[in-house]
Each structure stands twice: as structure tokens, then as C-alpha cells.
């Protein structure tokens, strides 16, 4: 199966510095490997004066950089314009807890295919009922002689996540609205009858950490 990585970024207070998105990409590669094709989707707002310089510097690092009008604009286009079976969707300011992610993307995608999972996210907190996760159901799946655990949720968050493109296009894409800034995705997909998954069983520790690129200089 073909799996690709999309990194979503915008021109923030730190632009045109690229160290935030580079740390995110390095952390992804250290956790999952560097063999996945990567595309960057960049909104030059809100720091528009530095946006063009930020995009120029991104193009020195990444093979494909697309300019977008917002996060939701780039997010929709990334799903519509791909031939990959699975997409890893990740904003520019996350790090991964490698020691807690014990499966490859291929293994995770195989479980998603077997269980018809179209959105599996890595959680920024322990897998507990909190915030938008108003109910979690622990699930098990045999994988390579062991047990793969995940939690079902009605919250399809923007936290780093893997999607099954074909099913996601059918179930989720019609609900996403192109809006300015970071709006139009997760709030449209949460508590509307969709079922997402979270890596790990109940009470499993946080597998990602948010660096909050909006406030970083």
C-alpha cells in the first residue's frame, strides 16, 4: 500500500524560520521512517509579510510545497489530489513519542483496512474520557501474534492522524468546509455520527506533544 505524508503549516510569528516544521518532520522520520513521500501545504497568513520568504525557505527543504488559503483549503486539496491509499496528516508543530508508538504505519494501515477505520489519530493526552472525547470504547485486533489496541471515539481531531483515503473521501470530505485560519475540519467531523480511532488502549499515555507553533518565535 502507498502511504504519503502531508505537513500543514502557515506563516506564524516565527516566519520565515523553518526550525519548527523541521523538528516535526525529523520527529516523524525518527518514529516512522523517511521513505514516505512528503508534501507541504502552506498558508502565508497571518504573518503575510514574511509568508513569501517562509515559502521560499520551505522549498529549499521539501520537494513539494503548495500555497493554500487556509488549513482547511490545503487539507481538502491534499485528499483530493493524491493517488495514495493512506495519508498521514500532520500540522507543523508536533513531536512524536517514539518509545510509545510500537507499530509501523504499514501495520497500522493494515488494521485500519481490516476494521474499516478511516481516521486514526495519535493523542496529545492519555486515552481517557476528556474534552471532545466524550466516550471511548477499547478495541482489540490480533496482529503478528500480538494484540493491537485502539479506542473508538466520535471525535475526529486534527491531532496527527492517518486516514484511509477512499473511505475518508466518502464519509468525511463532504463535511469539511473551507474556512480561514484553522477552522472547518475537526469541529465539522466531531459528534456527527462518524467513528474515529485513537492509537492505544484505554489510559494509554500521550503519543504526541504539541509545540504550539503559533506562539513560538
Image (spheres, rainbow, N blue to C red):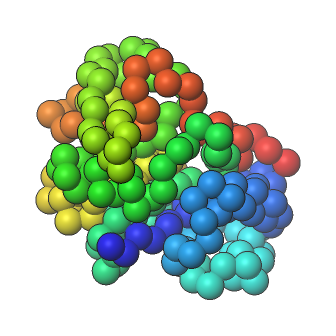
- Residue at 57%, 83% (x, y): give it: 64
User: Left or right of 120: which side holds 116?
Assistant: left
- Name the quadrant of the N terminus: bottom left
Q: Which of 169 and 96 is in front in this view?
A: 96
131 lies above or below 25? above
Could you say which quadrant of the image residue 25 lies in? bottom right
Residue 46 seen in render: no
- Residue at 40%, 62% (x, y): give it: 106
- Residue at 62%, 85% (x, y): give it: 63
123 lies above or below 181? above
Q: Nearer the viewer, residue 192 or 106?
A: 106
124 lies above or below 108? above
- Outermost residue, front side: 145
User: Left or right of 136: which side holds 51?
Assistant: right
Q: Position of residue 78 (x, y in %)?
A: 39, 70
Residue 113 seen in render: yes
Q: Where is residue 188 in the image (x, y as percent from the top left)?
A: 29, 41
81 lies above or below 108? below
Q: How many labels does the image show?
A: 0
Could you say which quadrant of the image residue 80 lies in? bottom left
Q: Where is residue 141 in the image (x, y as percent from the top left)?
A: 27, 39
- Residue at 75%, 83% (x, y): give it: 60
Q: Position of residue 91 (x, y in %)?
A: 56, 53
Could you say which quadrant of the image residue 202 lies in? top left
Amino acid at each position: 500500500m502507498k502511504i504519503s505524508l502531508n505537513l500543514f503549516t502557515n506563516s506564524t510569528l516565527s516566519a520565515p524560520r523553518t526550525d519548527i516544521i523541521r523538528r516535526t518532520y525529523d520527529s516523524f522520520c525518527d518514529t516512522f521512517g523517511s521513505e514516505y513521500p512528503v508534501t507541504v501545504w502552506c498558508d502565508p497568513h497571518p504573518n503575510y509579510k514574511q509568508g513569501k520568504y517562509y515559502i521560499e525557505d520551505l522549498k529549499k527543504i521539501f520537494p513539494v510545497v503548495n500555497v493554500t488559503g487556509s488549513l482547511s483549503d490545503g487539507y481538502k486539496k491534499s485528499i483530493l489530489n493524491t493517488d495514495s491509499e493512506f495519508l498521514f496528516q500532520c500540522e507543523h508543530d508536533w513531536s512524536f513519542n517514539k518509545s510509545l508508538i510500537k507499530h509501523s504505519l504499514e501495520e497500522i494501515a493494515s488494521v485500519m483496512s481490516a476494521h474499516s477505520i478511516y481516521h486514526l489519530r495519535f493523542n496529545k493526552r492519555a486515552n481517557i474520557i476528556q474534552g471532545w472525547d466524550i466516550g471511548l470504547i477499547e478495541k482489540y485486533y490480533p496482529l503478528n501474534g500480538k494484540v493491537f489496541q485502539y479506542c473508538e471515539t466520535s471525535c475526529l481531531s486534527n491531532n496527527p492522524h492517518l486516514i484511509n483515503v477512499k473511505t475518508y473521501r466518502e464519509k468525511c470530505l463532504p463535511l469539511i468546509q473551507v474556512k480561514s485560519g484553522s477552522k472547518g475540519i475537526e469541529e465539522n467531523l466531531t459528534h456527527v455520527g462518524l467513528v474515529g480511532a485513537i492509537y492505544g488502549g484505554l489510559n494509554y499515555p500521550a503519543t504526541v506533544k504539541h509545540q504550539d507553533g503559533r506562539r513560538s518565535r
